[in-house]
Amino acid sequence: MKSSKISIIIPVFNEATTITKLLETLLSRMRFRQHEILLVDGGSTDETTTIISNFIANYNRTHHTEKERCVDQLFSSDEAVVRLQLFSSEKGRAKQMNLGAQKATSDILYFLHADTFPPTHFDDYIVKEIHQGNKAGCFRMKFDSWHPVLLVSQFFTRFNLRWCRGGDQSLFVEKAFFEELNGFDESYTIYEDCEFINRLYDCEEFTIIPKSVTTSARKYKSKGTWKLQYHFAMIHLKKSKGATPEELYAYYQKHVASS
């Protein structure tokens, strides 16, 4: 019988203002409690790691009995609690997510950005897809913004087409399949999610759960929505024409990061 336990992997970097809200949301929206949350920090220079460490310590004090602290009992008990862990990694989302996958103890991996919030009972939806034989997929997505450009963009996430995909939609995948594909390509400083998802599509293994995650539009607000959407489209176009990871990163640094 396939496992129902999920390893939720969250790469973080300077997320002090949002990480507590994300963790509280994840815990409140799980249907089951046997999962684990692995936060992988890429060298934050703000209070991210302190906030996460304090959150984990407080959660453990509140939810773990002496019996539940026993590893053999942690996931078999009817009163099992979620296990939260914090790891350090080199900076780079691909490196951080690969490290999280290496540390994961579940057969199902769920990669989630720190500013993306999954729907209620997201774990149940993922497990059902896996048990139905779907090895990988994502949710639809909506922004926390009513900007018309973003409304159009989020509308297309309902279609099962590779050009409609992006990391903000989150990603679930069987761990064995993830390892078979050698995980995320760490030569990509940006576009690592899309590059891996393209390989999933090449294997004809991708499904869309008809529920939506909600992701922050903070970068669009700070950089300019029309401008940022244009540059993201150009990055996709450049990749389709054979641009290297280094060329994509150089374009991003010039037109997005430095603006």
Image: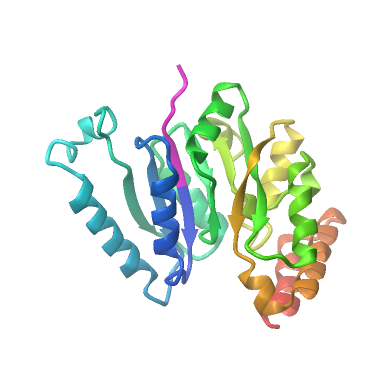
Q: Quadrant of the N terminus?
A: top left
Horizontal placement of 107 versus 170: left or right? left
Q: Residue at x 63, y 58 (%)?
A: 187
Q: Whole-percent x and y of residue 89?
A: 43, 60
Tell me if residue 64 comes above or below residue 192 in the rendering: above
Q: Whole-percent x and y of residue 25?
A: 44, 53
Horizontal placement of 155 versus 135: left or right? right
Range of magenta residues:
1-8
Horizontal placement of 181 versus 120: left or right? right
The answer to whether residue 72 is visible is yes
Q: How is the image coloured?
A: rainbow
Q: Whole-percent x and y of residue 235?
A: 79, 63
Query: Which quadrant of the figure has residue 93?
Result: bottom right
Is residue 86 covered in magenta?
no
Near-viewer residue (1 or 158): 158
Taken as a whole, is the magenta stretch helix, strand or loop?
loop
Query: Which quadrant of the figure has residue 181?
Result: top right
